[in-house]
Image (cartoon, grey):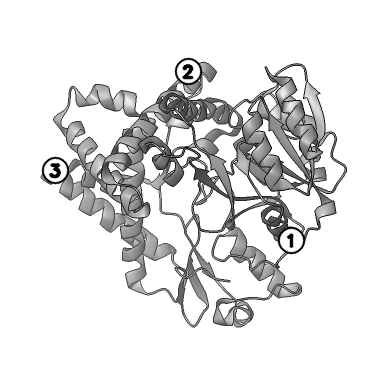
Amino acid sequence: MLFDDVLVFDSGRLLVGGSPLRAVRLSARAAELLAGGTVVADGGDASVLAARLLDGNLAFPVLPERLLRPEQVTVVVPVRDRPAQLDRCLEALAPLQTIVVDDASERPDAVARVVARHGARHVVLTDNLGPAGARNAGLEQVTTPFVAFVDSDVTATPETLLHLGGHFGDELVCLVGPLVDGTARSARPRWFERYDAAASSLDLGTRPASVSPGASVGWLPGACLVVRAEVLRSVGGFNPSMRVGEDVDLVWRLVDHGHRVRYEPSCRVGHDTRSSMQAWLARKFIYGTGGGALGLKHGDAVAPARMSVASAVVGAALLLRRRRAVPAAVGSAVWATLRVARTLPPGAPRSLAVRLVLEGTMWAARQESSLLLRHWWPLTAIACARSTAVRRAVLSAAVLDLAVFVHERPQLDLPSAAAGRRLDDLAYGLGLWVGAVRHRSVRCLLPRLRSTPRR
């Protein structure tokens, strides 16, 4: 089914939308199959069209209630201590068959008692391997065609995991992930717990997506995934050398091998927020450190921003708010509009080029704001001490970033949103720089610029 925001022109022959943004020209037969915005993938041309729309994030699949049966799935839960969270996790998963992999806990007896109480299989590691290694150890014990990975601080129900299996009706789909909600467990959650519940790093939004680098959803968190076991084995499982970013690496390797990965936010699981500010900030920092290794392994896929040169120039001019920047901004916008107009397929109205350039400019300004405040903040802080123009740009970026953030999360009060957003950026950005230095790779800090707008 087409997304509501996909633009349709020329009697259904031209579609504009998706992620990355694209214009798609359909044949008369394809337009007929898509009449009403829905195509039934029952083989032949219809299935080819459906695959093209799904891969381009122009449409989303309507899933059957359930495709997997409980006996087809084994759940692997990696854990290191956390007996109380493990107890809650296993209680929610019953009656699915479950393997708990104890990753060298400091209190193995406490973990063993919880596992025994729930009747799960127990694998004990004597050396701490990290999440990737522990998941691989569990995968070795799996004999079912599908495996679900659920972290011990996650609450997921059998109904959720089995419903995710609806995507496996497409034989090319090998991995599916749900929306991971932050869940505050404190009786009276403090402000940073409320922030993390509303703006979890693992919450990738409410829009279904085909996952790939550069798309609206470019990765999936390993906190909860359902995977075809044989496909996972064929790519070597999770990378055991990575203790952070191993989930991103797996998704990108699967996509590189020609497999499809889907994000299904209609299925939701709960992920416990950190109970102390120190632990919360430490987790943000650790997430950031994964960027260096990902840059070494996947190159430009890890780029923190993607935009055309023209959009970048206009977006920067907006943030600088200087009259001297207006001629460059206007010139770049006109040039970009002409280039876009020449690349649009027949049947597109002239006004579409202007609309696309305006949307690209605003998106570029948002990405540049994120670069200044999050990814590049150590350099930004130094530059602010020396340049009035940079200070002006940073103020503009902070206002724009916070306005968009609060609009998207109205449940947060303004002080919590402002404090949480800036601390989140500082912790993650610091981790990003530490990872870049550690792995001697700056790929995770460099935006990807295109000379022309994407067709």
Give, as a three-letter code, the residue at label 1.
Answer: Asp
Q: Nearer the viewer, residue 84 or 347?
A: 84
Q: Earlier in the sequence, mark 3 or mark 2?
A: 3
For this orientation, the residue located farthest to the left is 323
Crowding at label 1, few (<14), some or many (≥20) Cα neighbours within 10 Å? few
Residue, disc 2: 437
Residue 119 visible at all: yes
Residue at figure coordinates x 14%, y 30% from the top left: 388
Location of residue 316 (image quadrant): top left
Residue at figure coordinates x 37%, y 75% from the top left: 349
Give, as a three-letter code, the residue at label 2.
Answer: Val
Gap in angstroms between the C-alphas marked 1 and 3: 52 Å
In screen coordinates, is 233 left or right of 400? Answer: right
Q: Which mark is residue 84?
A: none
Residue, disc 3: 322
Residue, disc 1: 170
